[in-house]
Image (cartoon, grey):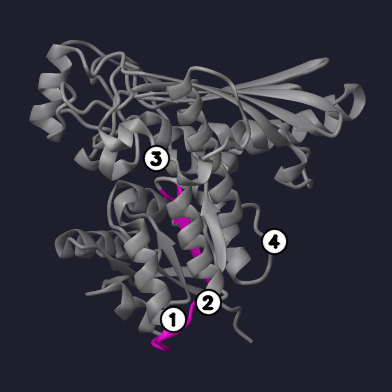
Amino acid sequence: MASPRLGVGFIGSGFNARFHMQGWRGVRDADILGVWSPNAKNAASAAALSRSLGVGEAKAYKSITAMVADPTIDALWLTGPNQARVENVEEIVHAVKSGKGTLRGIACEKPLARNVAEAKYIHQLVKGVGIATGYLENQLFAPHIETGRALLWARGAATTGRPYLARAAEEHSGPHMPWFWNGALQGGGVLNDMMCHSVLVVRHLLTKPGDALSTVKPVRVTGHIASLKWSQPKYAKRLKQTMQADYTKRPSEDFASVTIEFETPSGIAIGEASTSWSYVGAGLRLSAELLGPEYSMKWNSLDSGLQLFFSREVTGRAGEDLVEKQNAEQGVMPVVPEEYAAYGYTNEDRHFVNVFLDREQPLLTWDDGVEVVQVLMAAYQSAEEGKTLTFPPRGNDSFVPQVAKGTWKP
């Protein structure tokens, strides 16, 4: 008897979807069979990439409904832009409710939505049709995070006590696409875009393997945001030319920091997280630390173990063949081989395929995605009020950041 396989369709055909497709080479018992995007040319290109990678005979679909209606599609991966999340989920749910098709699961990229109201709304829609959910947070599945966390808890925490401080950061020089820079479309700036990674990483590191995230409960949140680079006249001009975003009139934050006080079974623990679109280095830098009574761990994605050097005589077009968000083509350059694996995409996708095939319990569901958005909005509330807030703060469910409204002044 043949093993069951999962047929997967992608909603979205951009940078993130293609990272998943590359990572899919390490996923078994699932095939990427479909792609839908409002840009038909991009959908066809992403489907062709899937076929070329040997991860599924994907084809482009004319609508989300058509993909749901295809009996070969068992699950969907939501990788489209934030501003399309609600309408995409509404179409999925309508197609299922109207009997056009069935699904075993929906996995959604971070953040689940632009604010708490949207996150709770789409979560309730999907719960209403009984579809299993997965929240895609690749950094929790990064091999260095998985291995370091397991070893520190098994050896350090088991003999000397729980960890009490975790740090995580994600930094680069700015997003690829114009919609990320638009606070109204994206839902904010770098805090909404990338802090969803870091706040979940610190909580995950502080949670004992095998225990629920709820055993490490956020109780107080302190947030800070700033526009350090992209509101400066020189860079604002460049941003308007390249990304059609006018940061002299409607800026978004390019730096954010959050401190979270957690209540754990043995007392208070602290999570420190920071994110930046104003970091200039070799490229994307992910980092994390975990500290306890007699132990610590650290991870920096740019400490990859592989470096190249190019003299000034080596010239060519700009690219990202060494590391994501690459900022230079000369000098000493770190290289991150198989970024999709190093950043956790392969492990993440393998996990959620097994979840939707009923082989594993989900590490993250849309319940977790909703709570991440609650923390992000609490951080924005704290930054706007200039003080530490008890979590969840009053008004969190209806809160929309000033950055998203276009009223924030750095």
Q: Please tell me whether residue 25 belongs to the stretch shown in magenta.
A: no
What residue type is disc 1 on? Val
What residue type is disc 4 on? Gln
Q: Local crowd at mark 1 within 10 Å, few (<14), some, or many (≥20)?
A: some
Seen in the picture, residue 401 relative to 409 is either above or below; the reply is below
**Quarter of the image holding residue 1?**
bottom right
Residue segment shown in magenta: 97-113
Q: How many marks?
A: 4
Q: Which mark is residue 237?
A: none
> How far apart in space, not on screen, are marks 1 and 3 (Cα)?
30 Å
Q: Is residue 310 left or right of residue 203?
A: left
What residue is drawn where x is 25% and y is 63%? 37
- Give the percent coordinates (x, y) of residue 214: 73, 44
- Give the percent coordinates (x, y) of residue 388: 58, 21
From the viewer's perspective, is the residue at label 1 or at label 4 nearer? 1
Q: Which mark is residue 400?
A: 3
Compare marks 1 and 4 and give the one earlier in the sequence: 1
Q: Local crowd at mark 3 within 10 Å, few (<14), some, or many (≥20)?
A: many
Q: Which residue is mark 4?
A: 361
From the viewer's perspective, is the residue at label 3 or at label 4 nearer? 3
- Give the percent coordinates (x, y) of residue 380: 45, 29
Compare marks 4 and 2 and give the one earlier in the sequence: 2
